[in-house]
Image: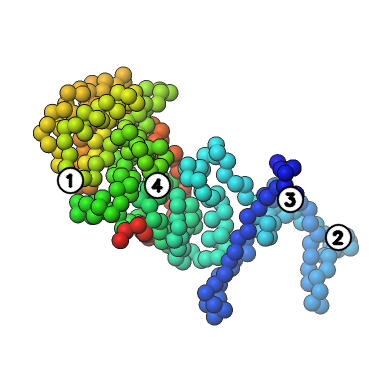
Amino acid sequence: MHDKRKKLFPKATDTLLFYVKDVESGFTFHGLKEMRVKPVQQLVRKKVDGKMINARDAQGKLMYQTKEDRTIDNVWRIPCLQPASPERLGYPTQKPLALLERIIEASSDPGDVVLDPFCGCGTAVHAAQKRGRQWIGIDVTHLAIALIEKRLQNAFPSIVYEVHGTPKDLDGARNLALRDKYQFQWWACSLVGAQPWQNKKKGADRGIDGIIYFQDEKGISKKIIVSVKGGESVGRAMIADLKNSVEREKAQIGLFVTLAAPTREMVKEALTAGFYESPNFKSGEYPKIQILTIEGLLNSTQRPRYPDLSQGTYTFKRASQEQEAAEIPGDLFDAGKA
């Protein structure tokens, strides 16, 4: 829509730059074609004595051919993502997958390595995997890495990749907690499948660091709040605070994720909250307050317990599954690790 306050045409395009390290390096370029909206009739052309002329049949009539595709030029008609787009994952700077696929197809060969040093929600690595390229994705936040992992696992269920820079053991978790408590909270939330509370804004959080939405009866969304503690000292009062938060937020379950081992008093306090009674699942299975340690989550001896018919799609939007390509190795790096 035109803004009358500005003496400019509305902006409807972005400009892409492509370049190489130096002239000697050269670059890969593949011309691409795309399907036309409607097939067109075109004159058949042929070269005679070095010149292109219109071809004619035996009766001398001009010859025509039906063309269903066209050569892609420097104007790419790729719509931007709309708020309701099925592809959108909630990341503010997310670009259309079709855009990154076209860039990668035009400027690399199958098996080449694609590097995205600011990979955000992972559109470039998704496109690279889909188009049979190796890839490396780097991002500074654990939140982004967790989102990309979920995206890749949904789109390519048998994908093989390595993640570098995220804690793999208790020492790594302690180190992250000391360096950056917010990054630790976001990483811990990813271990239980939670999204950060209030869209990862730093500041007062009312004792809530993450949230999980689940569905145990048709059409009704319910929630679990997550409290993360990265200190070495924890106590019963923290569990009491979580119980109050669950009640205040009208949540069904509260998860207490702790770096330190819980005390006996904490476990007793959690038991006093009782169980969440699901309308469609077995009773007595889901404690209202659940204490989970980082160590237990890392070694898979602990996990959140709650019923969910939506299989996590109420908390995170699910990327559509792609047709499986050949096994292409990939690497994700968390650039926030010292």
Q: CA gap, disc 1 to disc 2?
A: 85 Å
Would you say the residues marked 3 and 1 are in contact, meaning their CB atoms lie under 8 Å apart? Answer: no
* Residue behind mark 2: 62
Under mark 3, the amino acid is Leu
Q: Position of residue 169 (x, y in %)?
A: 21, 53
Q: Which residue is mark 3?
A: 8
* 1 or 4: mark nearer the eye: 1
Earlier-in-chain disc, 1 versus 2: 2
Q: Position of residue 171 (x, y in %)?
A: 19, 54
Q: Residue 232 shows which numbered tag?
A: 1
70 shown above or below 187: below
CA–CA distance between discs 2 and 4?
A: 57 Å
Using the rendered image of the protein, determine whether residue 288 is visible from the camera's viewpoint. yes
Contact, mark 1 vs mark 4 (Cβ under 8 Å): no
> Mark 4 sits on what residue?
147
Would you place residue 148 above or below residue 227 in this image?
below
Q: Amino acid at mark 2?
A: Leu
In the picture, which quadrant includes the C terminus? bottom left
- Which of discs 2 and 4 lies nearer the camera? The answer is 4
SS label for mark 2:
loop
Q: Earlier in the sequence, mark 1 or mark 4?
A: 4
Q: Earlier in the sequence, mark 4 or mark 3?
A: 3
Q: Nearer the viewer, mark 2 or mark 3?
A: 3
Residue at x-position 29% and y-position 40%: 192
